[in-house]
């Protein structure tokens, strides 16, 4: 996505985008942490799907040192 206005930082080192991409204010939404309100230019991909969506009903039982989930 392209940032029109606002600031972000990367959560992890950015290894995918080129310097040209970065100079055009492109960021990966999965890696960008907003530091301010943002105005974004987001491309609508319409009906493109890369993966089939599967929904699971889950119940969270514990969140200590490990996550235990029971499928219903």
Image (tube, rainbow, N blue to C red):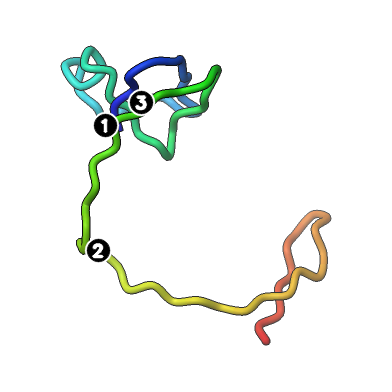
Helix, strand or loop for disc 1:
loop
Question: In the rendered structure, which disc, 1 or 2, sits on the residue that comes first in sequence?
Answer: 1
> Hey, which residue is sitting farthest bottom in the picture?
72
Of labels 1 and 2, the one closer to you: 2
Toward which corner of the image does residue 47 lie, by quadrant?
A: bottom left
Q: Which residue is mark 1?
A: 16
How packed mark 3 is, by other alpha carbons closer than 10 Å (few <14, some 14-19, many 20 or more), is: some
Residue visible at 32% across and 73% down in the picture: 52
* Residue at the spot of label 2: 50
Q: Is residue 6 above or below residue 27?
A: above
Q: Is residue 64 left or right of residue 12?
A: right
User: How far apart are the two marked residues, 3 and 1, measured between alpha carbons?
Assistant: 6 Å
Residue 27 location, x and y as percent? Answer: 33, 27
Please name the residue shown 73% across and 63% down the image.
Answer: 67
Image x and y of residue 28, in percent: 35, 34
User: Which numbered marker is on residue 25?
Assistant: none
Query: Observer-nearest residue: 45 or 22?
Result: 45
User: Where residue 58 appears, x then y in whole percent?
Assistant: 66, 75
The residue depicted at 21 percent of the width and 17 percent of the height is: 24
Mark 2, secondary structure of its residue: loop
**Residue situated in front as seen by the camera: 22 or 34:** 34
Cα distance in 3D space between marks 3 and 2: 23 Å
For mark 3, give the secondary structure: loop
Q: Taking 31 as reference, is 44 left or right? A: left
Mark number displayed over residue 14? 3
The residue carrying pointer 2 sits among few (fewer than 14), some (14 to 19) or many (20 or more) residues within 10 Å by Cα, namely few
């Amino acid at each position: 996505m392209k940032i029109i206005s606002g600031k972000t930082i990367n959560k992890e080192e950015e290894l995918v985008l080129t310097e040209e991409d970065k100079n055009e204010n492109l960021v990966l939404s999965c890696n960008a942490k907003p530091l301010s309100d943002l105005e974004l230019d987001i491309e609508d991909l319409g009906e493109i799907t890369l993966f089939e969506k599967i929904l699971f009903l889950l119940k969270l039982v514990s969140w200590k040192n490990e996550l235990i989930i029971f499928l219903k």
